[in-house]
Image (cartoon, helix red, strand yellow):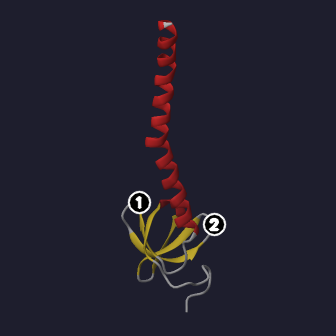
Amino acid sequence: MPTDLNSLTSIALPIGLLVLFYFMMIRPQQQRAKQHQTMLGALKRNDMVVLNSGLIGKVVRVEDKEVGLEIAQGVTVKVVKGMIAEVRVKGEPAAANDAKA
């Protein structure tokens, strides 16, 4: 009978650690990635965003994988959407590719 208890604990301990690892590490990371994708999907013109590098700018054009970002008056750069860390200020609702008014 004692050998059954030893084999049960030797199986239960690694399984318990895997479950703990999943809920402490993997699941929160998946949730953050999902929130980031949702944020990028809701990105629109005139949003103020912060890039991973710390650069702040205003979105002037949204494409599938890239964003036109105005970092100074008259200075527009193209950045990869995935490099946007956060949206600071939401712009007014506008079609993403309309000409500037």
Quadrant assignment for the C terminus: bottom right
Examine the image and state in which quarter residue 17 appears.
Answer: top left
Q: Which residue is mark 1?
A: 52
At x 61%, y 70%, the residue is: 63
Cα–Cα span, label 2 and label 1: 19 Å
Q: Secondary structure at mark 2?
A: loop
Tell me the amino acid under the disc marked 1.
Asn
Circle nearer the N terminus (2, 1) = 1
Q: Residue furthest left?
A: 54
Q: Label 2: few (<14), some or many (≥20) within 10 Å?
A: few
Q: Residue furthest bottom?
A: 101
Tell me the amino acid under the disc marked 2.
Asp
In the image, 63 versus 35, the foreground residue is 35
In the image, 32 versus 48, the foreground residue is 32
User: In the figure, is residue 80 to the left or right of 49?
Assistant: right
At x 60%, y 87%, the residue is: 99
